Amino acid sequence: MTNENIKDIVEGTLRYSDLKKINVSKIMLDQFKAIVNLIPTVGGFLAQEIQNIENYRDSEFIRKYATFIFELKETTIEERQKFANDIQEKAQDYSGNVLASIVDKMENINKEKILAKISIARMEEKISIEDFFRLSSMLERIPFIDLNELPKYQEDYYDSKGSSEILYSTGALRQSVIDEEGDDKYILSRLGELMVSCGLGVHVSIQNNTKLILASNSATVGGIGTDEIDKRIEDKFNQSIYNRLDSGQSDYDFFRSK
Protein backbone atom coordinates (compact mmCIF):
# COMPACT_ATOMS: atom_id res chain seq x y z
CA MET A 1 0.00 0.00 0.00
CA THR A 2 1.45 3.40 -0.95
CA ASN A 3 1.94 6.29 1.47
CA GLU A 4 -0.60 8.27 -0.55
CA ASN A 5 -3.21 5.54 -0.04
CA ILE A 6 -2.53 5.47 3.70
CA LYS A 7 -2.91 9.26 3.88
CA ASP A 8 -6.20 9.09 2.00
CA ILE A 9 -7.54 6.31 4.24
CA VAL A 10 -6.68 8.17 7.44
CA GLU A 11 -7.83 11.57 6.25
CA GLY A 12 -10.95 10.21 4.59
CA THR A 13 -12.20 8.17 7.54
CA LEU A 14 -11.40 10.99 9.96
CA ARG A 15 -13.13 13.69 7.93
CA TYR A 16 -15.96 12.00 6.05
CA SER A 17 -16.96 8.54 7.35
CA ASP A 18 -19.98 8.15 9.62
CA LEU A 19 -18.40 6.16 12.42
CA LYS A 20 -21.73 5.68 14.15
CA LYS A 21 -22.43 2.96 11.58
CA ILE A 22 -19.72 0.77 13.11
CA ASN A 23 -21.05 -2.56 14.37
CA VAL A 24 -18.63 -3.75 17.03
CA SER A 25 -20.08 -7.28 16.91
CA LYS A 26 -18.67 -7.81 13.42
CA ILE A 27 -15.10 -8.61 12.39
CA MET A 28 -12.88 -5.51 12.75
CA LEU A 29 -11.38 -5.70 9.24
CA ASP A 30 -14.79 -6.01 7.62
CA GLN A 31 -16.08 -3.03 9.61
CA PHE A 32 -13.01 -0.99 8.74
CA LYS A 33 -13.42 -1.68 5.04
CA ALA A 34 -17.06 -0.62 5.38
CA ILE A 35 -16.21 2.80 6.81
CA VAL A 36 -13.39 3.28 4.27
CA ASN A 37 -15.93 2.55 1.54
CA LEU A 38 -17.88 5.61 2.77
CA ILE A 39 -15.06 7.98 1.76
CA PRO A 40 -16.33 10.06 -1.18
CA THR A 41 -14.97 9.22 -4.67
CA VAL A 42 -12.05 6.96 -3.66
CA GLY A 43 -13.62 4.85 -0.90
CA GLY A 44 -14.33 1.78 -3.04
CA PHE A 45 -10.81 1.72 -4.47
CA LEU A 46 -9.19 2.12 -1.02
CA ALA A 47 -11.38 -0.61 0.49
CA GLN A 48 -10.21 -2.95 -2.26
CA GLU A 49 -6.59 -2.00 -1.52
CA ILE A 50 -7.13 -3.03 2.10
CA GLN A 51 -8.61 -6.34 0.95
CA ASN A 52 -5.47 -7.03 -1.09
CA ILE A 53 -2.95 -6.33 1.71
CA GLU A 54 -0.47 -9.16 2.07
CA ASN A 55 2.55 -7.77 3.97
CA TYR A 56 2.80 -7.56 7.74
CA ARG A 57 3.67 -3.86 8.01
CA ASP A 58 0.57 -2.70 6.14
CA SER A 59 -1.75 -5.12 7.91
CA GLU A 60 -0.35 -4.10 11.31
CA PHE A 61 -0.89 -0.42 10.52
CA ILE A 62 -4.50 -1.11 9.52
CA ARG A 63 -5.01 -3.01 12.79
CA LYS A 64 -3.60 -0.06 14.77
CA TYR A 65 -5.53 2.59 12.90
CA ALA A 66 -8.80 0.63 12.98
CA THR A 67 -8.45 0.32 16.77
CA PHE A 68 -7.88 4.07 17.01
CA ILE A 69 -10.70 5.19 14.70
CA PHE A 70 -13.27 2.80 16.22
CA GLU A 71 -12.74 4.53 19.58
CA LEU A 72 -13.97 7.77 17.96
CA LYS A 73 -17.33 6.31 16.96
CA GLU A 74 -19.27 8.61 19.32
CA THR A 75 -17.74 11.76 17.82
CA THR A 76 -19.39 13.70 15.01
CA ILE A 77 -18.00 14.30 11.54
CA GLU A 78 -17.90 18.02 12.32
CA GLU A 79 -15.82 17.46 15.46
CA ARG A 80 -13.36 15.27 13.59
CA GLN A 81 -13.10 17.68 10.67
CA LYS A 82 -12.20 20.51 13.05
CA PHE A 83 -9.67 18.22 14.76
CA ALA A 84 -8.12 17.35 11.38
CA ASN A 85 -7.92 21.04 10.49
CA ASP A 86 -6.20 21.79 13.81
CA ILE A 87 -3.62 19.08 13.15
CA GLN A 88 -2.99 20.25 9.61
CA GLU A 89 -2.61 23.90 10.58
CA LYS A 90 -0.29 23.26 13.53
CA ALA A 91 1.85 20.58 11.83
CA GLN A 92 1.88 22.29 8.42
CA ASP A 93 1.28 18.94 6.74
CA TYR A 94 -1.73 16.89 5.65
CA SER A 95 -3.61 15.65 8.71
CA GLY A 96 -3.68 12.15 7.20
CA ASN A 97 0.12 12.01 7.03
CA VAL A 98 0.56 13.39 10.54
CA LEU A 99 -1.98 11.15 12.24
CA ALA A 100 -0.81 8.06 10.34
CA SER A 101 2.72 8.69 11.62
CA ILE A 102 1.52 9.14 15.22
CA VAL A 103 -0.61 5.98 15.12
CA ASP A 104 2.13 3.89 13.53
CA LYS A 105 4.72 4.82 16.19
CA MET A 106 2.74 3.25 19.05
CA GLU A 107 4.35 -0.10 19.93
CA ASN A 108 1.30 -1.50 21.74
CA ILE A 109 -2.21 -1.76 20.29
CA ASN A 110 -3.74 -0.61 23.58
CA LYS A 111 -1.98 2.73 23.25
CA GLU A 112 -4.23 3.46 20.25
CA LYS A 113 -7.22 3.56 22.61
CA ILE A 114 -5.40 6.03 24.85
CA LEU A 115 -4.45 8.12 21.80
CA ALA A 116 -8.13 8.18 20.83
CA LYS A 117 -9.08 9.46 24.30
CA ILE A 118 -6.48 12.22 23.99
CA SER A 119 -7.92 13.08 20.56
CA ILE A 120 -11.44 13.28 22.01
CA ALA A 121 -10.14 15.54 24.79
CA ARG A 122 -8.89 17.90 22.09
CA MET A 123 -12.19 17.74 20.20
CA GLU A 124 -13.98 18.63 23.44
CA GLU A 125 -11.45 21.46 23.99
CA LYS A 126 -10.26 20.03 27.30
CA ILE A 127 -6.69 20.34 25.99
CA SER A 128 -4.99 22.55 23.40
CA ILE A 129 -3.79 21.24 20.04
CA GLU A 130 -0.22 21.85 21.26
CA ASP A 131 -0.85 19.60 24.27
CA PHE A 132 -2.35 16.97 21.96
CA PHE A 133 0.97 16.75 20.13
CA ARG A 134 2.95 16.79 23.40
CA LEU A 135 0.83 14.04 24.93
CA SER A 136 1.05 11.95 21.74
CA SER A 137 4.83 12.16 21.87
CA MET A 138 4.83 11.32 25.59
CA LEU A 139 2.53 8.34 24.98
CA GLU A 140 4.88 6.99 22.32
CA ARG A 141 7.90 7.17 24.66
CA ILE A 142 6.35 5.69 27.81
CA PRO A 143 6.56 1.86 27.91
CA PHE A 144 3.02 0.48 27.99
CA ILE A 145 3.74 -1.44 31.21
CA ASP A 146 4.55 1.85 32.98
CA LEU A 147 1.43 3.77 31.95
CA ASN A 148 -0.63 2.24 34.74
CA GLU A 149 2.01 3.37 37.23
CA LEU A 150 1.26 7.04 36.54
CA PRO A 151 -1.72 7.42 38.94
CA LYS A 152 0.59 6.47 41.85
CA TYR A 153 2.38 9.78 41.35
CA GLN A 154 -0.52 11.91 42.57
CA GLU A 155 1.57 12.19 45.72
CA ASP A 156 5.30 12.05 46.42
CA TYR A 157 6.44 8.65 45.19
CA TYR A 158 9.49 6.74 44.02
CA ASP A 159 9.49 3.33 42.32
CA SER A 160 12.67 1.41 43.08
CA LYS A 161 11.94 -0.94 40.15
CA GLY A 162 12.70 1.80 37.64
CA SER A 163 9.49 3.45 36.43
CA SER A 164 10.28 6.79 38.10
CA GLU A 165 13.34 7.52 35.99
CA ILE A 166 11.63 6.42 32.77
CA LEU A 167 8.50 8.49 33.41
CA TYR A 168 10.55 11.49 34.52
CA SER A 169 12.57 11.39 31.28
CA THR A 170 9.35 11.63 29.22
CA GLY A 171 8.13 14.75 31.02
CA ALA A 172 5.25 12.97 32.78
CA LEU A 173 6.79 13.63 36.22
CA ARG A 174 8.57 16.41 38.05
CA GLN A 175 10.71 16.16 41.17
CA SER A 176 8.78 16.89 44.34
CA VAL A 177 11.41 15.91 46.91
CA ILE A 178 14.99 16.87 46.15
CA ASP A 179 17.22 15.01 48.58
CA GLU A 180 20.94 15.69 48.65
CA GLU A 181 21.46 12.11 49.82
CA GLY A 182 19.68 10.75 46.75
CA ASP A 183 16.26 9.84 48.14
CA ASP A 184 14.40 11.92 45.53
CA LYS A 185 10.67 11.58 44.92
CA TYR A 186 8.45 12.49 42.00
CA ILE A 187 4.94 13.70 41.30
CA LEU A 188 2.86 14.22 38.15
CA SER A 189 3.82 17.18 35.99
CA ARG A 190 1.14 19.28 34.30
CA LEU A 191 1.33 17.07 31.21
CA GLY A 192 1.39 13.98 33.41
CA GLU A 193 -1.86 15.10 35.01
CA LEU A 194 -3.42 15.50 31.55
CA MET A 195 -2.21 12.04 30.53
CA VAL A 196 -3.80 10.46 33.60
CA SER A 197 -7.08 12.40 33.43
CA CYS A 198 -7.62 12.54 29.65
CA GLY A 199 -5.70 9.49 28.46
CA LEU A 200 -6.27 7.01 31.28
CA GLY A 201 -9.59 8.42 32.45
CA VAL A 202 -8.50 8.60 36.11
CA HIS A 203 -9.52 11.53 38.33
CA VAL A 204 -6.44 13.45 39.46
CA SER A 205 -5.98 14.96 42.91
CA ILE A 206 -2.45 16.16 43.56
CA GLN A 207 -1.15 16.13 47.14
CA ASN A 208 2.21 17.87 47.23
CA ASN A 209 4.43 20.49 48.79
CA THR A 210 7.78 20.62 47.02
CA LYS A 211 10.59 19.88 49.47
CA LEU A 212 14.33 20.30 49.53
CA ILE A 213 16.11 17.97 51.99
CA LEU A 214 19.63 19.03 52.98
CA ALA A 215 22.15 16.32 53.73
CA SER A 216 24.23 18.51 56.06
CA ASN A 217 21.65 18.74 58.80
CA SER A 218 18.78 16.61 57.46
CA ALA A 219 16.52 19.66 57.59
CA THR A 220 13.47 19.69 55.38
CA VAL A 221 12.28 22.89 53.78
CA GLY A 222 8.62 22.38 52.85
CA GLY A 223 6.30 24.36 50.62
CA ILE A 224 9.02 26.45 48.98
CA GLY A 225 8.64 27.76 45.48
CA THR A 226 10.34 26.36 42.39
CA ASP A 227 12.42 29.55 41.99
CA GLU A 228 13.89 29.06 45.44
CA ILE A 229 14.60 25.38 44.73
CA ASP A 230 16.28 26.26 41.43
CA LYS A 231 18.40 28.87 43.21
CA ARG A 232 19.52 26.42 45.89
CA ILE A 233 20.37 23.75 43.34
CA GLU A 234 22.33 26.31 41.31
CA ASP A 235 24.16 27.51 44.41
CA LYS A 236 25.05 23.92 45.30
CA PHE A 237 26.27 23.26 41.76
CA ASN A 238 28.36 26.44 41.72
CA GLN A 239 29.85 25.58 45.10
CA SER A 240 30.76 22.12 43.79
CA ILE A 241 32.50 23.65 40.77
CA TYR A 242 34.34 26.15 43.02
CA ASN A 243 35.54 23.38 45.33
CA ARG A 244 36.89 21.38 42.40
CA LEU A 245 38.67 24.43 40.96
CA ASP A 246 40.09 25.32 44.36
CA SER A 247 41.29 21.76 44.83
CA GLY A 248 42.86 21.81 41.39
CA GLN A 249 44.69 25.06 42.17
CA SER A 250 46.02 23.56 45.42
CA ASP A 251 47.40 20.53 43.57
CA TYR A 252 48.96 22.81 40.96
CA ASP A 253 50.64 24.94 43.69
CA PHE A 254 51.91 21.80 45.45
CA PHE A 255 53.60 20.40 42.37
CA ARG A 256 55.21 23.77 41.72
CA SER A 257 56.46 23.66 45.36
CA LYS A 258 54.58 26.79 46.33
Image (cartoon, rainbow, N blue to C red):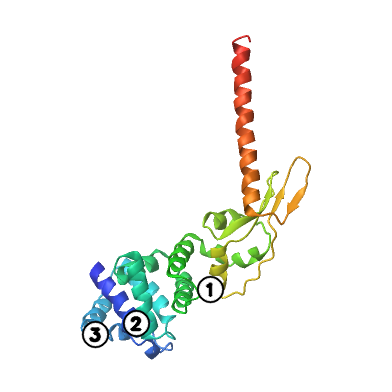
Please indicate, yes or no, whether residue 172 appears anywhere in the rendered image: yes
The reply, left or right, for residue 150 in relation to residue 25 is right
Task: Tell me if residue 167 comes above or below residue 76 in the rendering.
Answer: above
Q: Is residue 111 above or below residue 141?
A: below
Let me know if residue 56 appears in the view. no
Look at the picture and state if 108 lies above or below 30: above
Q: Which residue is rendered at x = 62% and y = 9% of the image?
A: 257
Q: Does 49 sit left or right of 235 as displayed?
A: left
Mark nearer the N terminus (3 vs 2): 2
Residue behind mark 3: 40
Residue 17 location, x and y as percent?
32, 85
Residue 226: image location, x then y, percent: 63, 53
Name the residue carrying label 1: 198
Asked if the residue under mark 1 is in contact with the one under mark 3, i.e. CB atoms within 8 Å, the reply is no
37 left or right of 115?
left
Specify the amino acid type for callout 3.
Pro
- Residue under circle 2? 32
In the foreground, 235 or 41: 235
- The one of 178 and 44 positioned closer to us in this rendering: 178
SS at badge 2:
helix
Q: Which residue shows up at 23% across the image and 84% down it? A: 44
The residue carrying pointer 1 sits among few (fewer than 14), some (14 to 19) or many (20 or more) residues within 10 Å by Cα, namely many
Residue type pointed to by label 2:
Phe
Tell me which residue sits at (43%, 87%) in the image.
Answer: 24
At numbered mark 3, what does the secondary structure look like: helix, strand or loop?
Answer: loop
